[in-house]
Image: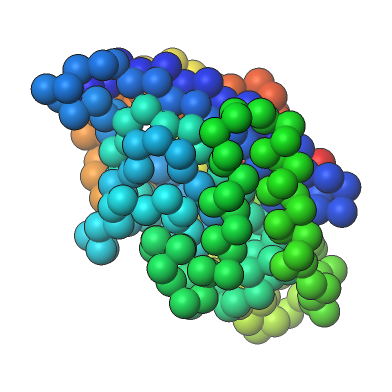
Amino acid sequence: MTQDCRVDVRFFPPPPEFADCFTSIYRLDLTVEDDAADGCRAEDWLQPEWGNLRVFSGDLPVAQVANGTVVADARFTVTGPSALATRFELGATRMWGIGLLPLGWARIVRLPAARYANFLADAERHPHFARFSRLIDVLDGANDDEAEYARIIEVLRGFDAPVADSARIRAVHGAMVELGLASVSEFAERAGLSVRALERICRRRFGFPPKLLLRRQRFMRSLAAWMLGGMGRWSPAIDELYTDQAHFNRDFHAFMGMGPSDYAALPHPILSAFMEQRARTLGSPAQTLDRPAAAG
């Protein structure tokens, strides 16, 4: 295993028709130190995020959500909305990623999000996701960003369908990313829903109950601030809604499967570079912090 790699990433804002559907569509070219003895791979940990479709040309990843099933040698992977870390290994490759906001999951995937929470699979071989396998063909070896992006949009348009509760999804998403949101009752009030209605839509469309979604937002604001702030001391990055360091440590273990000091001791060669570039380009370092339509 090596951590000497170069990350070249380019972000594409979705077309206006999909502004509320995708966090971004991005192309990543990963170059890893050529050391056959180390397997020419880098290791990193994906943080909690929304659902994603990813296609690879080159080295294929080995990935695992928490203690779940290891997925290896997949040209096309799918992840559902997550509240757990995903460990992965990846060598030199070209990858396209499609980050699905909750409304995008509803319109494009059209399956209950809760059923696929913390889910990772070889999409090409999965009965519910193999229909998206045409995305593999966008990587034709020419490495033409614009042509590949256009083909991705063409494929996705073929799966788009209207969603009856799209206005509610937008309202819930918009309320969820507001700063200082401390309780489910306040969440429901800002979304214009009863607590019971909020519970139903969060589980079906966002994958998790509202209380967990608020915890995830608080945690991801802290983790993103730490990674963009030089990855030094934790205390300046911890969100104001945490009561103390112990409170933050408990959430860190729950979401990442390790403590903050353990995570800080690990190299993050891909995610650190990716988040920095994402913040510069899109104004947001992580999917979970994106506001509805912000990427558009």
Name the quarter where the N terminus is drawn: top left
- Which residue is located at x 28 percent, y 47 percent? 62
Q: Is residue 174 above or below residue 273?
A: below
Q: Is residue 46 above or below residue 70?
A: above
- Which residue is located at x 57 percent, y 25 percent? 9
Residue 130 in view of the camera: yes
Left or right side of 19 for 195: left
Residue 200 position, x and y percent, is 63, 81
Q: Is residue 162 above or below residue 251?
A: below
- Which residue is located at x 40 percent, y 43 percent? 46
Q: Considering depth in this image, is 203 or 115 the residue closer to the camera?
A: 115
Residue 124 position, x and y percent, is 45, 63
Residue 150 position, x and y percent, is 76, 42
Left or right side of 28 for 67: left
- Which residue is located at x 83 percent, y 73 percent? 162
Q: Considering depth in this image, is 150 or 186 the residue closer to the camera?
A: 150
Most extreme residue toward the right is 16
Residue 243 in view of the camera: no
